[in-house]
Image (cartoon, rainbow, N blue to C red):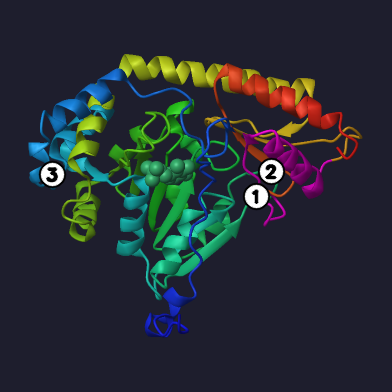
Amino acid sequence: MPPSSLTPLALPHVAGLHAYTPGLQPTEPGWVKLNTNECPYPPSPRVGEALQREIGADGASLRLYPNPKSSPLRAAVAQLHGLREKNVCIGNGSDDILNLLVRVFCSPEAAAGFLLPSYSLYPVLVEIQAGRSAVIEFDRSMQLPFDQIAASAARAFFLTSPNAPTGVAITNAELERVLASFRGLLVVDEAYAPFAEENAVSLLARHPRLVIVRTLSKAYALAGIRVGYALADPELIGLLDRVRDSYNVNRLSQAAALAALGDQPYYADVLARVKATRNASLRRFRDQRGWFTYPSQANFIFTEPKNARGESGVAVAQSAYDFLCSRRVLVRHFPSRALTAPFLRISVGTDGEMLVLHDTLDAWLKTPNA
Ligand SMILES: *Cc1c(COP(=O)(O)O)cnc(C)c1O
């Protein structure tokens, strides 16, 4: 093939773009997959039934475009949170919603702000817009840098709560402190809030500059269906509706999401199991292994492995990661930044999967180079 002449035709900021790095999705069976925070349990049985019903005997309904605003789903989400339909926008995953927010609020002149570490999609979305960013670093305490956020002059600031990859939650009192000093739009990405003790929904009534972003990928076991949503003031929802694709959520996804939201007792049970497994594993890392571990309110654990000599650091985390990988246990390591490099992020699986994880870590500790 001749050398491509296409890339020089692309906008320069696109030619130089760094794509988001998703976690590995192995295609062969046999892996204990604890790397992308998916739910270890299946979705409600009502989801499969709703999909069958939507497809029908011959798939005839698929000839027709879906509801453009996902209106029945907006109504169901509103009811779930005690809000109005006009407070809700549905996205093709919450990534779609985050993308819409960046489109509306970020440009080469208008900065979007975010913290490091937090969800690593934000800088990618900003780069796609050739947008300006205001980047603020956490220190190891993971306490919010309130003054720096207030001074950032960002149009929109993205906070992840509970945070990824640490699992540390921001309290509502802390969010109110940010809202009192920061003048822009505050986006709180609550992908993991169903696993937490508190969420920010009750703040919406008093704070029109607050947007909450949720997903059905984690707590509703529907990562493959791609549905997320924004909760906000109707004026903000109107802005998102101006820039979103007119049919951004397909028929099957709307049907699946409606069925899932309609089975709250099923999900209360799933959440209780995931949280119990998380808390048991957290105690094992902290109290039995003595590994520094952040207090997770999410469905994953961010822990700093120690080797047999009690040492930690990037090489130790890499060694544990590599050993787990060689035994087909997949977790996540973020070696590119000093704050995250000594840690592993481990999604909460079933009790059986966590047993395999801990047995494999015990085996790693007995290897000569651990
Ligand atoms: C998983 C995740 C998302 C993405 O959710 P989708 O609905 O699958 O696009 C958004 N934000 C955070 C913090 C996440 O961890």
Check residue 219 in the rendering and tell me which mark sits there, or answer none: none
The yes-or-no answer for disc 2 within 8 Å of ligand 1 is no
Closer to us: mark 1 or mark 2?
Answer: 1
- Nearer the N terminus, badge 1 or badge 2? 2
Nearer the observer, 18 or 185: 18
- Residue at label 3? 66
- Residue at x 32% of width, y 42% of height: 226
Image quadrant where residue 79 sits:
top left
* Helix, strand or loop for disc 3: loop
**Crowd rating for badge 1 (residues with CA inside 10 Å; few <14, some 14–19, many 20+):** some
Residue 64 painted magenta: no
Residues at discs 1 and 2 in contact (Cβ within 8 Å): no
Q: Give the answer, above or below, for where 360 lies relative to 230.
A: above
Q: Give the answer, above or below, for where 287 lies relative to 146.
A: above
- Residue at x 37% of width, y 66% of height: 106
Image quadrant where residue 48 sits:
top left
- Residue at label 1? 334
- Residue at x 58% of width, y 37% of height: 168
Q: How many numbered tags mark residues here?
A: 3
Which region is colored magenta? 312-339
Where does the image place residue 54, in percent across and percent down from the top left? 15, 31
Where does the image place residue 58, in percent across and percent down from the top left? 10, 33
Whole-number angstrom distance, CA of label 3 to CA of label 2 = 46 Å
- Residue at label 2? 141
Q: Amino acid at mark 3?
A: Pro
Q: Amino acid at mark 2?
A: Ser
Where does the image place residue 338, in percent across and percent down from the top left? 72, 54
Whole-number angstrom distance, CA of label 1 to CA of label 2 = 18 Å
